[in-house]
Image (tube, rainbow, N blue to C red):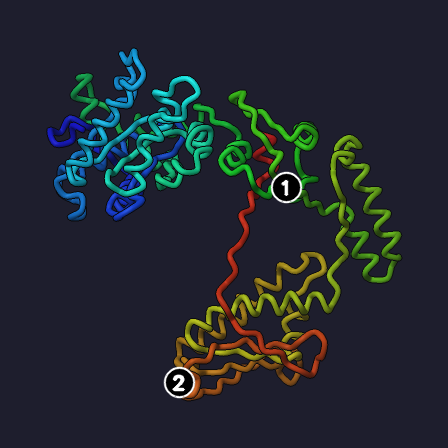
Amino acid sequence: MTAAVGNTDPVIGRDDEIDRVVCILCRRTKNSAVLVGAPGVGKTAIAEGLAQRIAAGTVPAALAGARLVEVDLGAMVAGTQYRGMFEERLKNVIKEAEDANSKVILFIDEVHMLVGAGKCGGGSMDGANLLKPALARGRIRCVGATTFDEYRKYIEKDAALERRFQMVHVEEPSTQATIAILQGLKRRYEEHHGLRIQDAALVAAAQLAGRYITDGGQLTEKIRRRPYSVILFDEVEKADPSVFNVFLQLLDDGMLTDGKGRTVDFKNTIIIMTSNLGAEHLTAGMNGQTTMEAARGLVMEQVRKHFKPELLNRLSEMVIFEPLSHDKLKEVVKIQMKSTVANLADKGISLTASNAAMDVILSESYNPMYGARPIRRWVHKNVMTKLSELLVKGDAGEGSIVSIDATADRKGLKYEVVKKKVADLRGKKPMVDLPSDSDDSSDDVVEVGPVAKKAKVVSFSIQQMASE
């Protein structure tokens, strides 16, 4: 590319993506990258930024002195009248890159065009299959660019080709990043047009572009990129009534059409809706003011009044959650405690809590109106604050065991720290010692292991959907 002679615009705000591409190119194998993003987000600009870094010498030794050469697939296909002409041209390019001893990096814009390029009749030999062996052995380094749609349509379906390229997501710049890009390019545009551009105009242009240049809906865009997802509509009863008409199409056909007229497939998603309708009836049933069976009936009656029958008829299952019992709430307290003090395991500190302490936490934090969420806030505000004080003051350190118990009046917590020699605990994992459910007088030891990874959930605001 022409970075060495300064004919390219400076690349601003893409340092993370360029760093990622540099890391991939420096590998011994699997050293080819593909830039995937929506049209116009700056994929080619990232390739130009890479060329500028190489020209400036601000790259690792593995890339020093390398040349980034753009391969024009359209020009290679043009004029190929007979079978084998395109293959010969592409093989010559590959051979030149191999003979350069990793000093030539190929940049292929619209890299998905390799799939099927030069293919004749029923044969399977195309540009992608010619390139695969060289990419697999790491003999050549390549940077491709394509969009999400074309990546899924062409490259993702060819598992062997997909493995050869390491994907780099290129997201649209934020408004602030766009302003920074415009300010960096302002001088060049002023010289070209012979006028002066005010900073306020740049800010207004960036803000108005984000406001008026329409994109696809937020929900449909997320599902287009990750079709295998769990979609959670929280507190769905608060949505605008027009949203439920969209739900009819979504739940019936499994398809949605966004503002650009593109149809998105939702058939591989799991849709969950939550609602607080009738919560007061369940609370009354829990308090003994009515039977739980009657409370469930009142809840379903309220649900049928609020939602249209055609919407309810499209739901696979409706589950009524009963209010949390005292035993279940103690389980919530136990989960919050285990989650919170897992941080102590990294410092070699163990924690024990008595049944009385758990009861104090539950009685002080639980509110029937707000459910179990206040428990987490109370544990963070009180227990974590006290534990932090013990660490800061040096009262607790590696090898310490912190015991939490209730005060004499059963309205507060008291903390006792027992220090042991680090040598005595070497090779042992810190533990959380919390009361078990089966026996209030006994303790069960739960080792604190790595925190489990959370499943990918697409959480979506109903109000956003109404505006789309």
- The crowding category of the residue bearing disc 2, from other C-alpha atoms within 10 Å (few below 14, some 14 to 19, many at least 20), is few
Asked whether residue 75 is in view, the answer is yes
What is the total number of numbered labels drawn onto the structure image? 2
Q: Position of residue 157 (x, y in %)?
A: 46, 33
Q: Position of residue 213 (x, y in %)?
A: 43, 23
- The residue that mark 1 highlights is 270
Q: Which mark is residue 422?
A: 2
* Residue for point 87% across, 59% down: 289
The amino acid type, in three-letter code, at marker 2 is Val
Rendered position, 455 above or below 140? below
State whether residue 295 is above or below residue 176.
Answer: below
Classify 401 as above or below 81. below
Residue at 18% in and 43% down: 63
Near-viewer residue (307 or 385)? 307
Relative depth, front residue between 80 and 263: 80
Point out the tag, 2 or 1, that comes first from the N-terminus. 1
Residue at (19% x, 22% y) in the render? 190
Any part of residue 243 in sight: no
Q: Quadrant of the N terminus?
A: top left
Q: Quadrant of residue 261?
A: top right
Q: Which mark is residue 210?
A: none
- Residue type, numbered disc 1: Ile
Q: Position of residue 430 (x, y in %)?
A: 48, 77
